[in-house]
Every structure is written in structure tokens, then in C-alpha cells.
Image (cartoon, grey):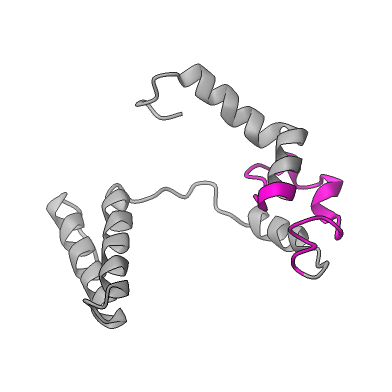
């Protein structure tokens, strides 16, 4: 839980319920196509039921098997760069300008890279 959370205990309990409760995992999968964020739900039968969404939407393919294999390969030691919030917001800004016709795709991506690199350096990081 983040240090900014005003209700750390409640937020932690909610995160645990959301990611470990079979009912929550099942409903999130069927109603929203949300794949489980923890290994707790990877083997639930509903994830392999080809007659329920999202598998039904994908023509009855067992897409959760593909997702499960991929999720087991995720590096759990991964961390976002400290300047990621800027990079994420900057991407949205550049895409908005592109969609409004003010930048070409190449210009938007170049600006995203240039401004993101400048922000990282401004924060004191060496970027190669």
C-alpha cells in the first residue's frame, strides 16, 4: 500500500479481497474481462469456460491459458522509473496533440521522448 493512503488497512484488505477472493476474481473475469493480478485465481475453472466472457467474445478460445503462461513469466522485481508519472502524463499530452491534428505521429513520439528524457535528467538521473 502506498504511504499516501489515508486508510492503509482498509485499502490493503480491499486489495487482498479483489485479488484473492474467488467470487471477486470470477465476477471481474466474466463481467469485465479482468485477468487475475495474483496467482490465486489462475486455476479457477471459470477462466477456462469457453462459453463465458471474455472467452466467448474471442470465439470460444481459452485465452486465459495464454494469459496465465504470460503472467508466470513476469519479473516480480520490476520497478517503474521514478519519473514514470511524468512520462505517462507526457504520453497522454502528446497523443492528445496528435489526435487534434497538431502533431504528426512521428512528431508526437519525438516530443514524448525528448521531454521525457529532459525530465529524467532534470531529476538528476543519467539516462543512456
- Whole-percent x and y of residue 90? 26, 59
Apparent side of residue 95 relative to residue 24 in the rendered image (left or right)? left
Residue 77: in sight, yes or no?
Answer: yes
Apparent side of residue 2 relative to residue 59 in the rendered image (left or right)? left
Specify the quadrant that holds the C terminus. Answer: bottom left
Q: Which residues are magenta?
A: 30-58
The residue under the point 67% across, 45% down is 36
- Whole-percent x and y of residue 35? 67, 50
The residue under the point 54% across, 24% down is 12
- Whole-percent x and y of residue 66? 73, 63
The residue under the point 75% across, 63% down is 63
Task: Assess whether residue 112 is covered by the magenta stretch.
Answer: no
Task: Assess whether residue 38 is covered by the magenta stretch.
Answer: yes
Relative to 106, does residue 119 appear above or below in the rendering?
A: above
Front residue (pair 53, 77) = 53
Magenta stretch, main secondary structure, is loop
Relative to 12, does residue 60 appear above or below in the rendering?
A: below
The residue under the point 67% across, 53% down is 33
Apparent side of residue 79 relative to residue 109 in the rendered image (left or right)? right
Residue 35: in sight, yes or no?
Answer: no
Q: Residue furthest left?
A: 122
Apparent side of residue 78 relative to residue 93 in the rendered image (left or right)? right
Amino acid at each position: 500500500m502506498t504511504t499516501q493512503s489515508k486508510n492503509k488497512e482498509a485499502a490493503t484488505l480491499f486489495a487482498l479481497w479483489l485479488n484473492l477472493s474467488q467470487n471477486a476474481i470470477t465476477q471481474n473475469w466474466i463481467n469485465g474481462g479482468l485477468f487475475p493480478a495474483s496467482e490465486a485465481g489462475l486455476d479457477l475453472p471459470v477462466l477456462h469456460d469457453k462459453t463465458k466472457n471474455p472467452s466467448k467474445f474471442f470465439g470460444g478460445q481459452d485465452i486465459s491459458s495464454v494469459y496465465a503462461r504470460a503472467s508466470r513469466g513476469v519479473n516480480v522485481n520490476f520497478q517503474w522509473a521514478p519519473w514514470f508519472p511524468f512520462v505517462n502524463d507526457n504520453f497522454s499530452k502528446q497523443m492528445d496533440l496528435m489526435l487534434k491534428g497538431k502533431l504528426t505521429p512521428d512528431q508526437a513520439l519525438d516530443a514524448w521522448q525528448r521531454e521525457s528524457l529532459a525530465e529524467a535528467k532534470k531529476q538528476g538521473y543519467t539516462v543512456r
